[in-house]
Image: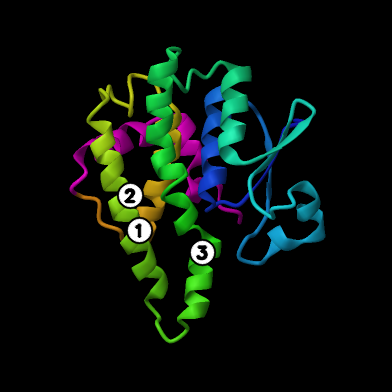
């Protein structure tokens, strides 16, 4: 049995990122579901793993890590994933592209936020959808604009998957789930096609890991 354990939730964007990276690294791991809908993340056991009550939590190499972007940094540095260019300036530009989704769009479009929106507007059955379709398209269109500074060959920033691809794909899953229209983003669509054909991304896809 592998000693690498990923505590995740199948629809969690942050967990999705880490699944992709683990697959790219060829790391075998055991996934333990933390059902966010059922409130498993608020259990005493999970809060002991992560006082923030968030997923993912990754146990690997004798360590326990939280925060997906920090986990991606660790896997990149210990598994030579080459998720970022070696040149510091180019790496900063790629990191900014990735963070435009992971830091600016994702936090306002996660389960906890839209759940709270729904509670604030109980009479509005479309509150969740309206929230998502308000925030996701502008964020992805900004990503599309930033992509013009890179050559998609065929991934966001070159001929191998990188940090930007890992952050983009989970947000695209959310866009499709909530009916957020990004059909005008041709570069993003091309990257999505390339990533969907990559085994590491396909194996991490939420519907592929959904429990039961």
The mark that comes first in sequence, 1 or 3, is 3
State the image coordinates of residue 84 (x, y, percent, origin top left).
45, 21
Indicate the secondary structure of the residue bearing disc 3.
helix
Please report contact status of discs 2 and 1: CB closer than 8 Å, yes or no: yes
Residue named by callout 2: 139
Residue 164 visible in rendering = yes
Residue at point 75% right, 30% down? 2
Residue 26 visible in rendering = no
Residue at point 43% right, 21% down? 91
Residue at point 48% right, 31% down? 200
Please report contact status of discs 3 and 2: CB closer than 8 Å, yes or no: no
Give 113 or 75, whichever is nearer the viewer: 113
What is the magenta range? Answer: 184-212
Residue at point 27% right, 22% down? 153
Magenta segment's dominant SS is helix
Residue extending farthest to the bottom is 123
| Circle on res. 135 | 1
| Circle on res. 195 | none
Residue named by callout 3: 113
């Amino acid at each position: 049995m592998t000693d690498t354990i990923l505590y995740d939730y199948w629809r969690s964007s942050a967990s999705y990122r880490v699944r992709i990276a683990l697959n790219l690294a060829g790391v075998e791991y055991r996934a333990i579901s933390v059902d966010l809908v059922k409130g498993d993340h608020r259990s005493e056991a999970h809060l002991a793993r992560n006082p923030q009550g968030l997923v993912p939590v990754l146990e690997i190499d004798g360590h326990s890590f939280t925060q997906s972007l920090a986990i991606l940094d660790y896997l990149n540095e210990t598994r030579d994933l080459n998720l970022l260019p070696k040149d510091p300036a180019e790496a900063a530009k790629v990191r900014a592209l990735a963070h435009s989704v992971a830091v600016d769009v994702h936090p306002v479009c996660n389960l906890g936020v839209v759940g709270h929106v729904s509670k604030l507007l109980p009479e509005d059955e479309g509150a969740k959808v309206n929230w998502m379709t308000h925030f996701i398209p502008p964020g992805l269109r900004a990503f599309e604009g930033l992509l013009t500074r890179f050559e998609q060959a065929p991934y966001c920033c070159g001929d191998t998957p990188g940090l930007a691809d890992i952050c983009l794909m989970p947000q695209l899953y959310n866009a499709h789930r909530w009916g957020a229209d990004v059909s005008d983003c041709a570069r993003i669509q091309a990257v999505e096609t390339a990533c969907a054909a990559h085994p590491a991304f396909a194996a991490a896809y939420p519907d592929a890991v959904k429990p039961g």
